[in-house]
Image (cartoon, rainbow, N blue to C red):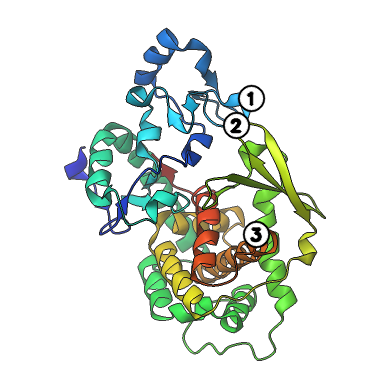
């Protein structure tokens, strides 16, 4: 099997450009795996920089400053071994997701994906796919089998739907997912209806804002509930600061990590004091575009499938998909509200864009039944 033998969907990156802003370095906070063929260089020239990464399946990776900061090779936001950087470093901000095909997805937490400058994303993605061909073939063999088993389980449980039909339904009713009154109704129906449809849904007349706040807050705080910088999302702001928000049950601490791997506290807040902000018309437009991006991502669909599997195939696929997408939107809006609370970003188009930059890496890290190559 080679590139010509498997399907690759490039739709998310078609027509886009990407660049690597020299001030950023956020991707260097992601500890990259060092592939077997790359290890000789580091063992020979930088043996102390090759470490076993934490996790249920340890792998060789590059060391981080103080064990939790940026890569040890990052100096003044520039890479000291750029010509020998790992395949995963070269690949960022592109993600190759394996299901029963390959989908190229673009990490929108990278500010270089928003400037409209740089290289042609499609050409870059095709080159990355060609370079990763051997790894793709291996990943597809496993992921295709997993998807086949998942669909069989869904049919046996009577919860199967046509994924393309779910996506089409969301596309046709996109405005529902930017309207709190509809989001509230969709989340309720996803929980109580045996088989839900978006057709004919009416907006909630008596909108329960506290319940919507709770849904977004709970989802957002779940990913921030750690004191380990490696385990919380990073938000690279317009001034290129690496912001990390760490949450406990009654407090969110806002830290900024410096280039040496040290955290500096900038503020704190009780999560209950953060009020949900509603985007204006321009903000809803940006939100709508992002929802459409998520709706086209195989990794998002795969994360819904992972939840269905975890819950024992109790919910119909349509309920799970629409419900997860609604909670995702509320998570994003709550993060926007949190950024506004700490930084005063507002609730317009720029604010929603900043919330996406904060959120998207977290979204791509969500558990899924497929695999990122």
Measured Cα–Cα span from mark 2 to mark 3: 23 Å
Measure the alpha-carbon separation of dots 3 and 1.
28 Å
**Helix, strand or loop status at disc 2:** loop
Q: How many marks?
A: 3
Look at the numbered discs 1 and 2 and tell me whether their residues touch, using CB distance below 8 Å: yes
Identify whether 147 is placed above or below 314.
Answer: above
Q: x, y percentage for residue 97? A: 38, 47
N-terminal of the two: label 2 or label 3? Answer: 2
The image quadrant that residue 4 belongs to is: top left
For label 3, count other residues whose C-alpha is less than 10 Å away and answer few (under 14), some (14-19) or many (20+): few
Per the image, the residue denoted by label 1 is: 66
Q: Which residue is mark 2?
A: 69
Q: Residue at left 47%, top 31%?
A: 32
Q: Which mark is residue 269?
A: none
Q: Position of residue 225 (x, y in %)?
A: 71, 48
Relative image position of residue 282 (x, y in whole percent): 47, 76
Q: Residue at x 39, y 80 (%)?
A: 172
| Residue named by callout 3 | 343
């Amino acid at each position: 099997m080679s590139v010509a033998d498997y399907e690759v969907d490039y739709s998310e990156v078609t027509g886009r450009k990407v660049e690597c802003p020299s001030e950023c370095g956020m991707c260097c906070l992601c500890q990259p795996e060092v592939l077997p063929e790359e290890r000789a260089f580091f063992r020979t020239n930088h043996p102390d920089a090759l470490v076993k990464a934490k996790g249920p399946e340890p792998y060789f990776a590059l060391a981080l400053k103080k064990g939790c900061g940026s890569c040890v090779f990052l100096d003044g936001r520039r890479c000291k071994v750029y010509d020998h950087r790992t395949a995963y470093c070269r690949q960022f901000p592109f993600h190759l997701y394996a299901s029963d095909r390959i989908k190229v997805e673009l990490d929108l937490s990278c500010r270089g994906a928003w400037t409209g400058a740089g290289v042609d994303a499609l050409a870059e993605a095709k080159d990355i796919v060609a370079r990763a061909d051997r790894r793709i073939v291996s990943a597809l063999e496993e992921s295709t089998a997993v998807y086949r088993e998942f669909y069989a389980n869904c049919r046996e449980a009577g919860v199967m739907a046509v994924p393309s039909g779910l996506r089409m339904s969301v596309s046709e009713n996109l405005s529902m997912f930017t309207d709190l009154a509809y989001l509230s109704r969709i989340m309720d129906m996803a929980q109580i209806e045996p088989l839900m449809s978006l057709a004919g849904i009416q907006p909630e007349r008596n909108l329960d804002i506290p319940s919507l706040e709770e849904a977004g807050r709970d989802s957002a705080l779940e990913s921030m509930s750690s004191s380990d910088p490696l385990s919380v999302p990073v938000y690279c702001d317009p001034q290129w600061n690496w912001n990390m928000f760490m949450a406990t049950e009654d407090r969110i601490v806002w830290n900024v990590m410096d280039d040496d791997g040290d955290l500096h506290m900038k503020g704190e807040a009780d999560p209950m004091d953060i009020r949900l902000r509603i985007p204006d018309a321009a903000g809803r437009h940006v939100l709508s575009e992002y929802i459409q991006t998520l709706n086209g991502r195989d990794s998002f669909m795969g994360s819904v499938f992972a939840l269905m599997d975890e819950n024992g195939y109790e919910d119909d696929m349509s309920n799970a998909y629409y419900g997860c997408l609604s909670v995702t939107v509320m998570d994003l809006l709550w993060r926007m509200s949190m950024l506004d609370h700490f930084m005063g970003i507002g609730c317009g188009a720029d604010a929603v864009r900043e919330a996406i930059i904060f959120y998207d890496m977290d979204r791509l890290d969500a558990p899924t039944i497929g695999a990122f190559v």
